Amino acid sequence: MKRLLLILSFVFFATHLSAQNGFSKLEGQQLNDFQRNLMESSEKINTLACSFVQTQNLSLLAEEIKSTGTMTYKNPSLLNWSYTSPSSFVFLVNGNNITTKTDQSKTTIDSGSSPMMQELCKIMVAGLKGDTKSLEGSFTTKYLTNGKQVNIEMSPKNKAISKLFKQITVTFNAKSYLVETITLTEASGDNTIINIKDVKLNAPVDESIFN
């Protein structure tokens, strides 16, 4: 869990569903309309807070690993991603500074010293906001829809990132344009599914949680 956050730094996205499960390719004017509406929606987000349930499926383990926590984001680059169960772990982004905290330790690094970390932070913040269009330079994207949801399947172009993640799938509600689920599929085939719940937009947040 901690390695995943340290490598990825994020948020955001959905179980991989194929066309046989009711999803088909989104294209033409429908795709243009969705991208425009998603961008307009993301530009209105100043703060976003939610809870989440994370499920990891690892080939070496027979049982799933479940974790819960909360996430708070403030535009343009403040993020607090906190695990509360089964153990406490906090991941903070404040500009270029990335901090991880446990009950026993705290570590801070400057993402500006690592081009890969800069790229991962960009991916994380863009995903949380729903600004997937800005990621098209870093990913090969495919859009699928079942009418109620839109899956954006993103395959990384960056070789270093592709060694870690084969695909990142973001599932949006087709009406609200909010992220519902995040699926991170690793190169090994293991995956992590993050279900987003209780989303609150543009509510006041205590900025001390980012320090």
Image: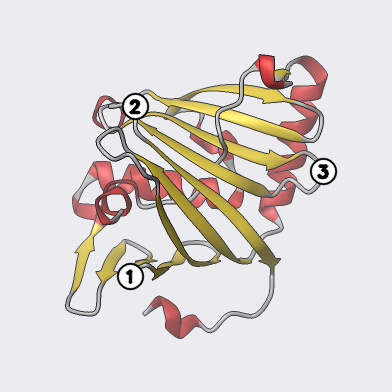
Mark in front: 1 vs 3: 1
Which amino acid lies under the numbered mark 2 shown in the image of this protein? Answer: Gly
Write the residue at 28% across / 27% down. Answer: 188
Sort mark 1 into few (<14), some (14-19) or many (20+) by Cα contacts within 10 Å. few
Is 208 placed left or right of 75 in the picture?
left
Which amino acid lies under the numbered mark 3 shown in the image of this protein? Answer: Lys
| First of labels 2, 1 by sequence position | 1
Q: Residue 70: x and y, percent? A: 51, 68
Nearest the camera: 74 or 7? 7
| First of labels 1, 3 by sequence position | 1
> How many numbered tags mark residues here?
3
Q: Residue 85: x and y, percent? A: 40, 69
In the depicted structure, whether residue 33 falls above or below residue 123: above
Q: Residue furthest front?
A: 62
Sort mark 3 into few (<14), some (14-19) or many (20+) by Cα contacts within 10 Å. few
Q: Residue 100: x and y, percent? A: 27, 67
Q: Quadrant of residue 191?
A: top left
Q: CA distance from mark 3 to mark 2?
A: 31 Å
Look at the image and tell me in which quarter the C terminus lies. Answer: bottom left
* Residue on which disc 2 sits: 189
Task: Determine contact: label 1, label 3, CB under 8 Å.
Answer: no
Write the residue at 73% across / 35% down. Answer: 149
Q: CA distance from mark 1 to mark 3?
A: 35 Å
Write the residue at 78% across / 49% down. Answer: 176
Badge number at residue 87 = 1
Q: Secondary structure at mark 3?
A: loop
Sort mark 2 into few (<14), some (14-19) or many (20+) by Cα contacts within 10 Å. few
Q: Secondary structure at mark 2?
A: loop
Q: CA distance from mark 2 to mark 1?
A: 25 Å
In the depicted structure, whether residue 170 falls above or below residue 88: above
Q: Quadrant of residue 200?
A: bottom right
